[in-house]
Each structure stands twice: as structure tokens, then as C-alpha cells.
Amino acid sequence: MATPTEAGLSPVAAFALVGCLGVGAQWLAWRLKLPGIVLMLAVGLLVGPVFGILNPSDALGDLLPALVSIAVAIILFEGGLTLKFKSLSDAATGVRRLVIVGAPVGWITSAAVLHYVGGLSWATSAVFGGIMIVTGPTVIAPLLRQARLKRRPAALLQWEAIFNDPVGALAAVLAFQVVLVTMTSASAAEAIWSLVLGVVVATFAGIAAGWGISTAFRRAYVPEYMKVPVLFVTVLGTFAATDAVLHESGLLAVTLMGVWIANAHLPSYAEMHRFKEHATILLVSGVFILLAANMSADTLLGLNWQSLATVAAVVLVARPLTVLVSFAFSGVPWAERLLVAFTGPRGVVLVAVAGLFGERLVQAGVEDAAGIAPLAFALVAGTVVLHGFTLTPLARLLGLTASTTPGVLIVGSNRWSVSLAQVLAKLELPVMIADPNRSRLRVARDAGLRVYSGDILSEAAEHRLDLMAYGRIIAATDNDAYNTLVATDLAAEFGRENIYQLARDTSESARYALPPKLGGRSIGTGETYWDLQNRMWNGWEFRATKLSEEFPLERWFETNPDGIPFAEMDAKGELRILDADSAPKGGEDVHLIAMVPMKEKRALAEGQG
């Protein structure tokens, strides 16, 4: 193994380069609306085997495997933090089948493909087949964020990816122990005892660590400013301790720890999860760049038609067969079965664990195990590219996307919000009005609008509503404090640039001014709730006007000198909400959504003048 002091990039330069490339690739993917994972994979290959700018093994030396292992552990822990049992709801049956039935069936089918198509020995196929159970939370999370699936199919893919990752690693450990017993003088009893002990210790340690953190945080044994550091070192300690008992069992421990904390109802859960989510974005991008850059040109050139045939058989035979057998005689709709069956991207866990067991099998005398690492990379690259470009179209074809166009969620039912929602609905934008007061929703309900009676910040709303269908939030209640609370709480999930609220009555007073981190963007010209309601009482209404070459934006302003533009929608259905600092851009086939006084009211006012 090369040392970090050899010629090439220093460890500091390597870390900086990986960080810049990873985050830059994700940002570019966001701008171009491309799968981020695909760009990260391409960037890693370009700076690694193609141009030779970065060789992680030379730059980081023996630290590379340890860094990848720790990163994977943190990623799985963060994944566990997202798994709330209440979010399972009607997806619980499907998730149980994918884990209990799908894991062993996937192991068998993958091993068979590796042996009969890939030409690997049964020993290598059994170990690698166990690793191939994993579907990779490092890949699923970005894909789900991009595809905007409905809640149940998204839950199926997310829970399967996170739970089956440690299951796949442990399956590989089991197969490896069997290979050692059959090919060496190792004792079967010792191998079984080692495996059982490792799983029991990891399960106990993960639950104990989760319970300990939850209890300490709930009873204020840890000050607020130290909660994230304490959580971070506990994850590392739990992973290292259990991994020392049985290799790869640490992944099970940190996953269970995350699930326990996620369901402990801690007041500081949101802040912890937000920090871990940001850390995971950095880790996922970094690990993908490192693993792609670490592939040698010889390894990539060694891939042949048999490797491609193996990847194709896994995607088109092993994965669909596993899912269809798992969901047999269940109530899961066929559209969801097909989506899950043809969505099985592999991620960094597969590459990291496959490389480790490949080396160990070679040391044990299994010669063809040297082909595990390049085949694992081919599988990851193939599935990442394939599903990165096909998941959204496939989900749309099956009717499983939350919405083809991100809609608008309006919090607060009143004359102004109902009038705005009706115009948006006529433009075929998904729109919903939520209000804690059921009686206030009567007008919206009578207008045929979708409504939700309850607090939008409640756990019930989180689990019952398919919020992925909405890309913009407008807080428009008569309570300024509640509007600010809604905007602040939902900003982390939807992005602060997509959160709007009506201007506060006291926003112009320095004594009542809020810091920028609180609240959302002020919608329209910065009028308050009562200003807008007075306009509605005085005969104003919302109208959507289609601009064209014959009727441009300038002509609209001439025709509606008192009009107040609030939003515009382009020909692609993209909605742009206007705030106090922005103005409509206009353009061909753009719909301008604005408040204007009714014609008869305006004529009456002019006549009286």
C-alpha cells in the first residue's frame, strides 16, 4: 500500500479536491436537472483513471479504507434517523416482505447469476451474492429527491435500502465463514459462534446506544450545544466497538441506533437530523468521488462482455424476480411492484464491502475472487447511470410520481387564499389549502379545492400528506406568528427560496423586526393579511392572463395600471412567485397571475371620480 508521503497530491490537497468536486458535481446536477450520482461517478473517473489527477490510494494511503468505512457508517446512521415507524403506514407489509423474503431470495438469485452468467465459482458467488442484497441508501436518497415519488413507493425503496445494507454485509460475512470452514481447517462451531456473537452484540449495542442517547438528551444530561458532538462520537464508538467483534456488524449497530433515536420523539431531533443530513451529502459525494477515482485503468479495461451480461442479468432477472417473489399474494399494487422491481441501484457499501471480501477470499485461496472488485464497480456504475435516467420516467409512466409539476401548498383559508388557489387550479397546478380551523375550509371545499383540516406542522400531516407534490409554500393565515413558524419550520425541507408568507403588521418597526433566519420571503408587494383582505372586500380578484407577442407584459400594465402581479407561470408549467424585490419577466406563452379590481368596481370608482 502506498503511503501518503509519496509523489502526488498531499492528503490535504486530496481532501480539498474531493470536497470541491463532490459538492460542485451535485450543484451542477441541480442546475442542469441531471442525476447527481451520475455526475459524481463521471467526475471521479475523469480525475482518477482517465487523467490521473487523483489517486486516493497514494494520497491517503491506509487511511482510505478506514475513511470509507466510517463514512458508510455515518450514512447508514443518518438513514436510520429517517425511518420513523409511523411513516411506514400502508407500506409496512411491503417493507417486511422485502427484508424478510427479499433478502434471502435476492441472495440466491444474485449468486446464481454470478455463477452461471459471470462464470465465478460458487464460493465467490455466495459471498458476492450476499453483498448484492444491498440497494444502497447513498444512491436511493438522491434519486428519490429527484424523482419526487408518491409516499408509499418512496417508503418501500427507502426502508429496503437502509435495512438491507447491514443485512447484505452480514450475509457476506456468513458466506465467507462457510467458505473458510470448507476450504481451511477452521471449525464450523467457531464460525457459527463468531457470527451469532457478532450479530447479538451489534443488536444490543445499537439499541443500547440509541436508548442511552435518547435518555440523556431527554433528561438534559447533555447541554444543547454538545448534543451533535456527543451523538457523532457515540456513532463512531458504537461502530468501532461492534466492528471489532465481527467485521461489518457495526453497520447493523449504527442503523438500529438511528432507528431507535428516530422513534424516541426527541425535541431536538430535527436539528440533529438536519446536521446529519448535511454531513451525509458531503460524505456521499466524497465517497463516490474517492471510489471512482481509485479504480485503475487496467481494472476498467479488464471488464468484458461477460461483465456487462452479468450486470444486465442482475438488473433484468435477479432484481425483478426477487421483488416479485417478495410481493407475491400481497396487497401491493402492480404499478408499485414493477417500479421497485426495476429500481435497484447499488452504492458505495457494495464497492467497499466487495473489495474487502475479495481480498480475503484471495488470501483464503479462492483465485477468481480477484474479479469481485471490478465487477462490483461495473454493477454500481451501470445501475447508477441506468436508474439515474430511468427512475423518473418509469415512475411517471406508472403514475407513481407525486406530480409532474411541483404545486403550491397554501396555509390558511380565507378569501384571498381561496381566490389565488382557484386561479392556480385552473392552470392545472396542484394546489391545496390547509387550515387548523375546519369551518374556515368550507369556502375552499365548496370551490372544489383540495383541503387539509389540521396543523400543517403536526406529525399527522407529515405522515398523511404527500408533501412531495408541492414545491412552494405560502403561509397566509391571519396570525403573523404562526405564519413565521410555518415558514421557518418548513424552510429546511423545501428550501428557504420556496417559502413565502404575508408581510407582518410590525415588520417595518425595528423593535419587532425578525432576524433573516426566521420566516419566509414576503409575497407580492409586501402587503399584510388585512391589506389583502380589504382589497378582496373592495372587489379585487385574482386573474391569470396569458401573455403573447400581441399582448406583452407592457400592454398588460397599460390595461391594468392598478394590478398587482403575484406570480407567473411559463410554458413548461414552472411557477415563479414574486416577492417585494422581484418583478415579472413576461415572455411568450407566460401566464401572469395578478390581483386586479373587478371591472364594474373600477368603472364605478372612475365614474365617482
Image (spheres, helix red, strand yellow):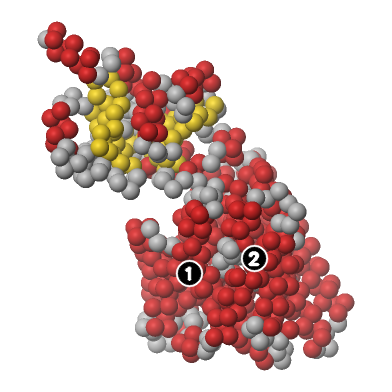
SS state under label 1: helix
Q: Position of residue 157 (x, y in %)?
A: 60, 56
Task: Compare residues 222 and 323 and report the one nearer the observer.
Answer: 323
In the rendered view, would you say 469 is above or below 436?
below
Name the residue that disc number 1 marks.
385
Please report the residue visible at 53 percent of the width from the left and 29 percent of the height from the top: 452
Helix, strand or loop status at disc 2: helix
Cα gap from disc 2 to disc 1, whole angstroms: 18 Å
Residue type marked 1: Val
* Residue 170 visible in the displayed image: no
- Residue 39 lies left or right of residue 123; in this view the side is left
Work out which quarter of the rendered image holds the C terminus and state it: top left
Q: Nearer the viewer, mark 2 or mark 1?
A: 2
- State yes or no: discs 2 and 1 in contact (Cβ < 8 Å): no
- Residue placed under numbered mark 2 in the picture: 320
Residue occupying the point 35% across, 31% down? 423
